[in-house]
Image: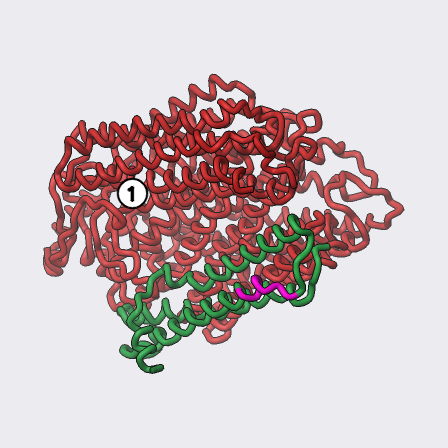
Chain colours: A green, B red
Amino acid sequence: MIERLRARARSLNVTLWTLIVPPTVWAAHFLFSYLWAAIRCAKTGSFSTAPGVFWACTILALLVILASGWIARVQSRTPGDHPPHEEGTETDRLRFLAYATMLLAGLSFVGVLFTAAPVLFLSDCR
Amino acid sequence: MSLHAQDDPGLRHAQEERLRAAWKPPEGWLRRWTDVNNNRVGVWYTLTAFAFMLFAGVLALIMRTQLAVPENDLVGPNTFNQLFTLHGSAMMFLFAVPMFEAVSIILLPQLLGARDLPFPRLSAFGYWSFLIGGIFVLGSIFFNAAPDGGWFMYPPLTTRTDLSGLGADIWMLGLSFIEVSSVAAAVELIVGVLKCRPPGMRLNLMPLYAWYILVVAVMILFAFPPLIAGDVLFEMERLLGWPFFTAEKGGDPLLWQHLFWIFGHPEVYVIFLPSIALFAMLIPTFARRHLLGYPYIVLAAVGTAFLSFGLWVHHMFATGLPKISLAFFSAASQAVVIPTGVQIFAFIATLAAGRVIFSTPLLYATGSLAIFVIGGLTGVMVAIVPFDWQAHDTYFVVAHLHYVLIGGTLMPLFAGLYYYWPLVTGKKLSDRMGRTAFWMLFAGANLAFFPMHLSGLMGMPRRVFTYPSELGLGGLNLASTLGAFLFAAGVLVVVVDMALSPPRAKAKRNPWDAGTLEWLAHPDDEDWGIRSVPLIETRYPIWDQPGFVAKVDEGRFFLPDAEEGRRETIITSVLDARPVAVLRLGTPSFVPMLTAIAVGGVFILTTYHLYWWALASGVVALGFILRWLWSTAEIPEKPCKPIGHGLELPLYIAGPQAPGWWAMFITMLADATAFSGLVFGYFFFWTVHTGFPPPGAGPGAAWPMIALALTAASWGATLAARELHRRGGVAPARLLLGAGALLSIGSVGAGLAGPWLSGLDPAAAAYPAIVWTLAIWTAAHAGIAAIAQLYALARSLAGRTTPSHDADVGNVTLYLHFLLFTAVVAYATIGLFPEVA
């Protein structure tokens, strides 16, 4: 099962667009958080102490980032060519983009956690 | 042509003669200013930005002299307001951003082994716009008419014409003009990095400078347009009385703060990243090894770019937004530390792992990192909301931002100056003077700005022209003033060093023994950029590819000739840099300069309320732009040409492979971002006012829906025209383009009919004002669509667009895609949202 998934992940296309998937998810989650709080506070004056919609979206964002990070990790280990993988070959270009995507996934994951943290501690619109 | 053909010195000489003739710069006292070659335009650009920096620096010295002692009366409050406003605005808009564009115009083609950037005339246009706008804005201080509302121009101080004079208009319109030229530069740089790399330079071999520039140029596309949208609203309020920011008429001054800082914070990274990019080039050279952690640097650049868009509210912590909102932005402000730290550690690790040559440029680099880190640490402090409330609007913030900008932008640029001076002039600057200047700058910056942390915490507010002696701030301020003068003396030493350079002997080629492509440049500069476009196999080709320099020089790589006497460069694919086509580049022309003058006329004449003259200037500008476009996408005399090594490339390409398509796509992305800034304004009013939109007061649903239907029909006609045209149906395609233009004009009328017929008075309240703005914006874009459709029709009738050469029709269709998107959002917002709300 895992092997099949890995093979599937490896066959996915890697481009500049896939590179920015994890930070784009962070940006979407950030924008959502900002709008959610701004609209809740402006229109109802409060938000619930356990905001289900907010946590659902946060978990969704984390899952998408995890998935893209995992795919990128598999792709960044595509076999072929020698270390340090800095050559002008198809494999090394792919490994580089995938590796950078994986790093961005890590940063974006932390970024989403950072954004979500205030909702744990704050409970009103003051 | 084979490798061996290049063995013949006679052939090589003939090739060089042809290249020289094709790239010959224009001569004569007037004509020389029509040059578009990146080496000259880049140098003009750099020198102009440098001169503006010196000017803004002098303004700072006057301020520091005024503040040297308590209750000083060197300048009055009015002049002081103009001084700090102009100092900040000029350093940001006329130095830091243009300087990065200028340096990139010089360096990027060299780094990418290209003969020039893809749109040389666009670079020239950008330069002339910058020059005109810069002189306009800076010159105002000599007439006591400079902007005086702070570099962020907060309303209502700046929108009320009884509180602020012409200066606010000069700021808004002069700098809008420069923002347009920045977006033009972004288009040029993005297409340059993505499409003009040498064969073989896959994304993983690209010099890190190019990565940074790509990231920063994309940031400009999303950061600058919200400010342009804000400028539009701002001037509508100042000139026409449309109350977007006036609270008593349903506006909100905070809307301006949002739009300004959505631009303003990414802007900090827009100027920081390209400067730090210079480190990524010079550190490997002086560490004598490859840079460590290449993908980590890319992570840092891309990660910073994204996170920087989640920071803007940290300039607004004291505005009374809900704490939960503040906390989101505080969190993102903490998170951006991670990528920033990563790149600094990558640099330090490279130095630690290398055999370091401690040259003058490296001295500047390490010194500026030290200053930057201090600014970064105080940045983490002010990113924490409760601390920020204490430090807000005090000299602590002044200290923080100057540490960041001097360590993150100015000193790195001096490092770059000492590193790249031989590339541009063929001569080295003096090490002795450079090191002397460094220590003066380093000591001066710390002496000037460190005491400000203390004076700020002791309660000294920003932007005051004087302070009473009882506060006990005299000593700290005097130290700051002495530091500022020491810093200025350091800059003076650098200027003298540059002035002494011309008589000095030429340095040897590649004087630092660097490994990257830009150092192929010869001290006796040729205008052709590069003798032959190399095949790249490594990140440091001069170090790692045997015989590389000789092969380039002997024309053994690609495109070593200009058989047809044309300026050419190679277009390659985005990911793997596979050769795709040969692009014929723009040649010297008066058109970019004249276009800049005409566009500048629109902004400058509007400042003085000369609307008819401004309109006339706009019509002239449109004429020049169409004249300029007419010469592009020409049908070549033959379909393909050989570029050496048995490769033959087409001379014409259309669609997503072509630079022109990318330019349109990128421009429209910026345009869509500006539009989303206006839409943000509409929904911002909705969140802050309970009675928005007022029931029954809107433009109704009918006219907006008719306008949308007409726009959709125009889009459909253009799409059908493209498809039929491609299949040889020239006549029906022409008919459809004509019909599309009529439909577009119809949608202009229908779009404006909604607010017009429902009698919305834009000066009465914020709601009608924002509805009118969205309608006018969309209608204006439909009007441009009509011009574009008629342009494509004219090109077809003139035989400049044919079924096999259809770039124009494709680009117009792309424009229509964006127009349709704009129309859907705008008309749904003004027509349907009131029904839903």
Q: Position of residue B710 (x, y in %)?
A: 35, 32
Using the image as rendered, state which of residue B71 and residue A102 is in the foreground: A102
Residue A16 locus on image (x, y percent): 36, 60
B111 in the magenta segment: no
Name the one closer to the observer, B833 or B408.
Answer: B833
Pinpoint the chain carrying mark 1: B
Q: Residue at x 33, y 73 (%)?
A: A9
B273 with respect to B468 (left or right):
left
> Which quadrant of the rendered structure holds the N terminus of chain B?
bottom left
Q: Which residue is mark 1?
A: B660
The 10 Å Cα crowd at callout 1, few under 14, some 14 to 19, many 20 or more, is many
Q: Amino acid at mark 1?
A: Gly
Residue found farthest to the right: B470
Residue B585: percent from the left, percent from the top?
26, 41
A51 and A9: which is toward the camera: A51
Residue A54 is inside the magenta segment: yes
Q: For mark 1, give the secondary structure.
A: helix
* Visible residue check, residue B205: no
